[in-house]
Amino acid sequence: MSDSITPLVPAEGWHVMHLYYSIDQSQWSLLSESEKREAKTELSQLVQEIRSHPKTQLLVFAVATPKADLGFMLLTPDLQDATHFEKRLTLALGPDVLTPTYSYLSQTERSEYTTTSEQYAQDTLIGEKGLTEGSPEFNEALAEFDERMKHYLQHRLYPVLPDWPAICFYPMSKRRSPHDDYNWYSLDHEARARLMKGHATTGRKYAGKILQLITGSTGLDEHEWGVTLLAKDTMEIKNIVYEMRFDEVSARFAEFGDFYIGMQLPLNELFKRICL
Amino acid sequence: MSDSITPLVPAEGWHVMHLYYSIDQSQWSLLSESEKREAKTELSQLVQEIRSHPKTQLLVFAVATPKADLGFMLLTPDLQDATHFEKRLTLALGPDVLTPTYSYLSQTERSEYTTTSEQYAQDTLIGEKGLTEGSPEFNEALAEFDERMKHYLQHRLYPVLPDWPAICFYPMSKRRSPHDDYNWYSLDHEARARLMKGHATTGRKYAGKILQLITGSTGLDEHEWGVTLLAKDTMEIKNIVYEMRFDEVSARFAEFGDFYIGMQLPLNELFKRICL
Amino acid sequence: MSDSITPLVPAEGWHVMHLYYSIDQSQWSLLSESEKREAKTELSQLVQEIRSHPKTQLLVFAVATPKADLGFMLLTPDLQDATHFEKRLTLALGPDVLTPTYSYLSQTERSEYTTTSEQYAQDTLIGEKGLTEGSPEFNEALAEFDERMKHYLQHRLYPVLPDWPAICFYPMSKRRSPHDDYNWYSLDHEARARLMKGHATTGRKYAGKILQLITGSTGLDEHEWGVTLLAKDTMEIKNIVYEMRFDEVSARFAEFGDFYIGMQLPLNELFKRICL
Amino acid sequence: MSDSITPLVPAEGWHVMHLYYSIDQSQWSLLSESEKREAKTELSQLVQEIRSHPKTQLLVFAVATPKADLGFMLLTPDLQDATHFEKRLTLALGPDVLTPTYSYLSQTERSEYTTTSEQYAQDTLIGEKGLTEGSPEFNEALAEFDERMKHYLQHRLYPVLPDWPAICFYPMSKRRSPHDDYNWYSLDHEARARLMKGHATTGRKYAGKILQLITGSTGLDEHEWGVTLLAKDTMEIKNIVYEMRFDEVSARFAEFGDFYIGMQLPLNELFKRICL
Amino acid sequence: MSDSITPLVPAEGWHVMHLYYSIDQSQWSLLSESEKREAKTELSQLVQEIRSHPKTQLLVFAVATPKADLGFMLLTPDLQDATHFEKRLTLALGPDVLTPTYSYLSQTERSEYTTTSEQYAQDTLIGEKGLTEGSPEFNEALAEFDERMKHYLQHRLYPVLPDWPAICFYPMSKRRSPHDDYNWYSLDHEARARLMKGHATTGRKYAGKILQLITGSTGLDEHEWGVTLLAKDTMEIKNIVYEMRFDEVSARFAEFGDFYIGMQLPLNELFKRICL
């Protein structure tokens, strides 16, 4: 990127863009077979280029129902890069072929409700397990916890996303309803942390079946968070979202945007799927 | 489907897609008579192909009012197949002829509020009817109930849809209003089961006149459920939806999307109906 | 209609479609003068054909403001016919000339809040007027009432719509607000009947000036009812809708869609009005 | 207008149409210089023709921001005329050049909250000023009041709009919120009159700086009233609307649509402004 | 500007327009290389012309996600100029290339909640710091405060915007919810001033990292204020908006529109970024 451009890299974490397009099959049909081949090659090469950019991931998927045909999820540190990749992806099949139908900008971020080392030592090790502070068992358990949290934080800020076939995205916000019991932002941190903890418990039941990534978008896009679920099975997606709806934090405080279901596919299979 | 594609088949039930299109008559008018014949043949053959796919149903209908002209309801286990069929249906009359106007993705699912064998034995057979547990009458009645429930579950998960002429679709959600008495997801299971039971009673009055299929879409599409009503008469559709609106579960907790009315027709009649 | 098509005729009443279109003047301008004449003739002949279909009425009107240019209101028993007429009307001026901007599907229906013969005898004749049951005055008054109700019901189910110049349409629903005092569907029948009676009283003040037709659309389209007002004067339309807004039933329980104002015109005048 | 057309002239007042268009510059660019000149001449002549129609005013203005480019405000008694003028204005620059982006239909109307002669005599002259009924001072003051009210009513029903440069339009409704203290239509006339009086007091502070015209649209268009503000300065528009928002009648009961800001210009300047 | 045009310059402050466009790449691709060069030169020259207009600033930026490609923020005293610049910017790349996707009109304005000289003397200098009125320390501190406030007011009314890379815009309103505790416009000035003060405290924590400009739009556009944030880092944008959401004034009273993230770039870099 040119020297005259100031990078926009967050102090921690990456920028994340979700991009959804429909194919203008009428424009596509105007291309000759060799032009179509070229167009597909150009998109394939751009996908390669983006994937080989440092610290950058690009998921590519077919989208279910005519809400969209093709989707991308792009993770990269610098918003300057992200925007340029996005504009080029939109054009890669030719100037009129991809019509944007939905998009979302967010950033990976740490959770403010994560249990701290101090809380864990006090509440769990000393309080629940009756360990003595500084004892070998205590030290070992705390080191283990710290290691787990480090991995967890690493996944929140710098996730490595697997190629599981099903990908669900939806944006959400916390309510500020004109009713004191339904206004998330009027709650104190402790109350919010307690509510989030119940939610996390539900999430953990799906470990190994659902990989969930929460990214922040307050000030960046229409809602306050984006939620990406990777799964091996759409039924698990339905189950986790449904089950979480009964968690108090969702039942009282969550507002959801629309849901998009995609299928990660190798590019050659993707082209067949969406009739290119 | 290629070996490099992981099937997305739910552990139980099928994927369901509702697809609504309007005809771009201007594009259609550009085709020659023989091109039109070919296009109609291609759609007809695709409909045949989909209908002969294992465990797959495809309903085809004309849609009332210019909200849409043509509608499909597709039921098939694997979302990979469903998406490919959907993209091909969109294109079958030519690249510009069908414009998607509405769609919905859901899955058949069991109801969590079904009376269990144990509840029925305790509440109805022993409680209401005064039968002795393990007595021949008790055993027979319970076996009958189990058989009925098996059929009911079979219909929920693997429905066989008749060719009744009228088809109504609407999506719906349960409210999480910022008011404790209007928040479905804050109710406990027992309260929800009681409310759903009243609803089912209304539904049973229309047995033989209305076939109702509830499919789940939490996490899959904009609302939480899709409702498909097949009927021999649109007045019955109006009556059942109106009557159910007074059930407490609808009056207090239901949010409805838009309603789409279609007419199942043989393809040759359908083409005439929508002026192809 | 072909024998392979099952009619969709309600047990009582007719189907009603409101159709609104804007003219694509750019497409229209591409036609030669003789093509324009032909297109107008085709629409005129179709209007004639529909109007001569049994039990069928078709109102044709110019629409005020660019919300739409041309409107139709179609009343006919069979939804199969209604849909076919609708698709043909959309195409009658050529494949690209009429663009649908709004539509509504409903059915004529009896009111569930009409005073019954028994109620009238008890409350009005015996209660208010002090007549003796079975007396000649009583019998005559009751026969008169029954005759009036028969006519009223006939108008609700099988209305004959006059060619009054102004036509207003709007859809509406009754609220199910998350507040017990604003939830129509939680009220019992008696409370609803009382509220509707006040509304009817307002309506009767406009007898001869406004002809009002309420048609049901729960399960058929986005709202629960369609309201068509025929008038000789738009000021009366404004007055009745405004006055009714203060009736408790509207003030607390009504949700309104958008309002469309049209002018019934002979076809030759209509063509001039909308610059065809 | 043809004899076969029934005029639609309100018993008092005029019809009012607000019309907003964007220019399709791509279509415009296809015209030759002489075609462009002709198109502008045609629009200019139509504006002249409409302005010379009896009892008819037409304001023409450029619109700020790409919400629209060109706006008209049309006041004329007969809705038949208004609609025909509107369809012709839409076409005057050629069939594809003006794309409608927003419109609003309303009628001039008297306020139901105006102080009556009797109220003024009783409350102000006798009550506040201590005058004796029938005394010369009383009679003179009452005659003055009646004259003032006559002018006020004249302005409400038959306004003469000045060519002040700034024109603001927005539609509004009074709330029927599901909460007893926020439901305008559940208030009695006295309470409403009191609230409106406070509002009028704010309005009078802007006399000479803002000319405000309230027109009624219940039953005619999406909201219940249209508000047109003519001003010499957009800051005054911002100030009056902001200040009125604190009046109880707005703070509790007003719902606003979007706001459109235009600039009245001579046609030749207007064409330059919007790059025709 | 022509003499026949009345300037629309507010008594204090400037007009502000935010303009967002997407590129119609299909139209762009129809241009030859030299036409593209010319088009870019024309836009560059117009940007120069606007920037050299007295008291006028024009920020130019690429926009993240397909919500838009190109954005402008224009500050200039006269709305007549602003509108003409806006229409010309829309056309500068050719008649079809820039499609407006969002825009916002507002004015710079003073805050009504700024601490006055008198309040500061009384509350802070005499009250908190215990200074004696008229003492040298008092006088010096007050003069310092007055100077600071003068600068602050200057920035609110006549801001000089830096070329920081990230620019965020969102519109917002204060709630008038049908609930007494959530209705901003029913609060008295003191209560509002107290709530705004808490908000300002949060804002000051980001001094040097975020430059915030609040502009007023009541009566001018859809919301009541526009908020422009200039930053060196998008993470700071996310942080400030998120943190402020917990301020009581946001938690209870703020309604937000959508958020737009742009990157200020030199024009040659901008053209590359958006693939022109």
Image (spheres, coloured by chain):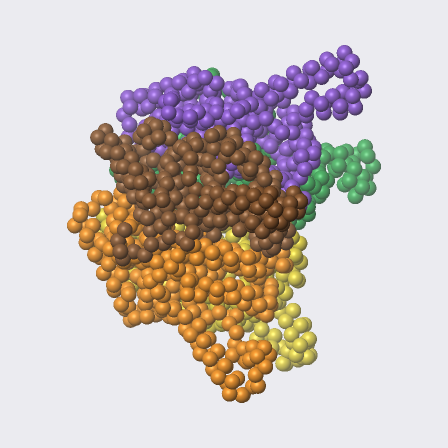
Chain colours: A yellow, B orange, C brown, D purple, E green
Q: Nearer the viewer, residue A7 or C71?
A: C71
Which quarter shows the C terminus of chain E?
top left
Q: Residue B25's spot in the image, x, y percent?
A: 27, 45
> Based on the displayed image, in which of its 4 quarters is residue E137 positioned?
top right
Q: Residue E128's spot in the image, x, y percent?
A: 79, 43
Q: Residue at x 64, y 33 (%)?
A: D244
Q: Nearer the viewer, residue D274 or E239?
A: D274
Number of disc labels: 0
Q: Residue furthest left?
A: B34
| Residue E233 visible in the snapshot | no
> Based on the displayed image, in which of its 4 quarters is residue D116 positioned?
top right
Q: Residue at x 48, y 29 (%)?
A: C233
Q: Residue furthest bottom?
A: B135
Which quarter shows the N terminus of chain E?
top left
Q: Tell me: residue C161, above or below residue B62.
A: above
Q: Residue A229's spot in the image, x, y percent?
A: 46, 64
Q: Nearer the viewer, residue B96 or D142?
A: D142
Q: Residue furthest front?
A: C136
Q: Tell me: residue B256, above or below residue D44.
A: below
E112 vs E140, left or right, is left
Q: Residue at x 42, y 20 (%)?
A: D50
Q: Residue E66's spot in the image, x, y percent?
A: 41, 48
Q: Nearer the viewer, residue C91 or B237?
A: B237
Q: Residue at x 55, y 57 (%)?
A: B246
| Residue B181 visible in the snapshot | yes
